[in-house]
Image (cartoon, rainbow, N blue to C red):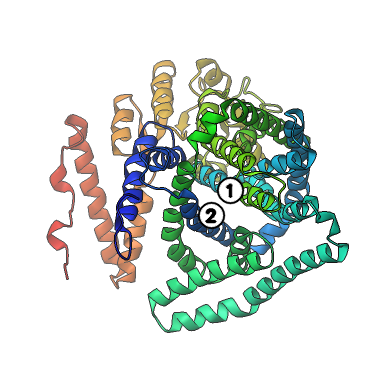
Amino acid sequence: MATETAGVDLVSVVTLLGAAVVAVPVFKRIGLGSVLGYLAAGLVIGPFGLGLFSDPMAILHVAELGVVMFLFIIGLEMEPSKLWAMRRDILGLGLLQVLLCVGLLSLVGVVLGYPYAGSLIAGAGFTLTSTAIVMQMLQERNDISAPKGQRIVSILLLEDLAIVPLLALVAFLAPGGEEVTLVGRLQGVAIGLGAIAVLVVAGIYLLNPMFRLLAASRAREVMTAAALLVVLGSALWLQLGGLSTAMGAFLAGVLLSESTFRHQLEADVEPFRGILLGLFFLAVGMALDLSVIAANWRLVAISVVAFMVLKSLAIYVVARMNKASRAEAMERTVLMAQGGEFAFVLYSAALAVGLLDSEAAAVLNAIIIVSMALTPVMVILHDRFKPAEVVSTDGMEAPDGLKGQVLMIGFGRFGQIACQPLLARKCTINIIDDDPEMIRVAETFGFKVWFGDGTRLDILKAAGAETARAVMIATDRKETTTRIAKLVKHEFPNAVILARAWDRAHLLELVKEGVDHYMREVFHSALALGGKALEVLGVDDDEIEDVAESIRRRDAERLALQMTGDIYSGQSLIIGNAEHTVRS
């Protein structure tokens, strides 16, 4: 920084926070995502932008704590049983991807004329995907807990473990590294496994009693300090054992995943995780050495393209070999095609033992950072141009010449309940829906649902709308419900139409289309819950029923006024709380 102050450098802190506060909302607003916003902000304020910071790597080392805390929170979501269920993906899918990527990516350096040892280390470093970027992307896409997200998490865990043998490989390939004995290498592996074993034992027998003791003290700040101690202490312990800090934090999270303090720990760590992870992305942007890229732009460009293309090919092939769909394989490829933060560790170790010179290490770091910066752009392009997902309709039976007393259109959570009184009275009911997955699930519960689009006249006729005495519309989209109601009213005027209304405004739309009976999906359940709250407060049953009846009457009066007026008619019939608010 150009400006130095005694004690805490507030100028630096304010600059970092200001850059994030300005860049991230702008990039999210224009659809480029928060990660690219952080990277761009870091590039602008870094030594190769405005020059407000001169040592981005120092910030990067601190900011890596954000990755550590992110892995701790992911661990909290992974009960040991869930982790055990993922063992095939971790040891099979992850190992296969790592080996294939290392093999293919090592060829890049060889083709460019570099020594075999240096090429192997360069390719191995690019194999290690950025845990921070991928996990952030999965979180923003709400895919972490989805099966496809869990498979990606499994691969990332294996890659974190892979840093240990790769660092051992660096020592072996270094000049004089062949002198390292087999006993020495086995000793390193034993130390790593011993560190994991000690952490597991401590987690099982010490962590929960410690948090119970601290909770009894009712000192919130001590609980927060203890949460940070567990995260950072676990990370440090595995680092001392030769493993990655992220793996230590992840294991600590897994060990606490079934603890009664799990949600408290997550709440305590989350603010630190968010700030430090953002700082990590800022530091990566600052570390993008534009002078190195300018001096070696052809090499950097060729290497970035070659590494990302070959890694993408390996990821896609492995995904398809494990029976992933084309869409899932392509999405995994786009998310994981970049290098990661652990490559910096590997290249630093290779530089220290003479496998790489300083210029080669700088170029490789630049290649990794450029690939990380390209990932959000690739994800955006993938999401924008990917073909519409085609849902398989194999085995789906379309309606044809059906007859029945009732035709139900839509079999989601509302329709599944609405059909029960009819089926209890042995009424003949034909059900159609346009969601193949839902139809398959319904069959496992003993329902016959035909596949069909209720907005099409031919499907309605085939499903028996011409002879049905009642047509129940229970779709999950209000626009679709309104459209079907209009079509049924026009084409089948003798049928009584009963429709699910999403809210009051939707109900008024349905009335205009001539729906005979309607039901707001939350009105009666919400009223019942309010009555239950009165019961908890000691109000007797008769008075609760009187209150409920009064609310129903007021609602009906207001609805009548809205039918002849607008949505704001009858506001005086709403019971507000402004006059009854109690302030301390």
**Nearer to the camera, 14 or 75:** 14
**Residue 511 sits in quarter:** top left
Tell me where residue 205 appears, x and y as whole percent.
Answer: 64, 79
Q: Which mark is residue 451?
A: none
Which mark is on residue 341?
A: 1
Q: Position of residue 213 (x, y in %)?
A: 49, 83
- Disc nearer the start of the sequence (1/2): 2
Compared with 390, 584 (above or below) is: below
Q: Could you tell whether 293 is left or right of 327 in the image?
A: left
- Circles 1 and 2, Cβ within 8 Å, touching? The answer is yes
Q: How many marks?
A: 2
Regarding mark 1 in the picture, which secondary structure is present there? loop
* Amino acid carrying mark 1 in the image: Glu
* Viewer-proximal residue among 381 and 40: 40
Q: Which residue is mark 2?
A: 67
Amino acid bearing label 2: Val
Dot 2: element: helix
Q: Is residue 424 above or below residue 582?
A: above
Q: Position of residue 317 (x, y in %)?
A: 75, 32
Q: Evaluate whether residue 405 shows in this view.
A: no
Q: Nearer the viewer, mark 1 or mark 2?
A: 1
Q: Is residue 444 visible?
A: yes
In this view, 359 is above or below 386:
below
Q: Is residue 129 left or right of residue 511?
A: right
Instruction: Please name whichever residue, 264 or 240, is drawn nearer the observer in this view of the structure.
Output: 240
Residue 177: x, y in percent?
80, 55
In the displayed structure, 236 sits above or below 387; it is below
Q: Residues within 10 Å of mark 2 (few under 14, many from 20)?
A: many
Q: In screen coordinates, is 399 left or right of 465?
A: right
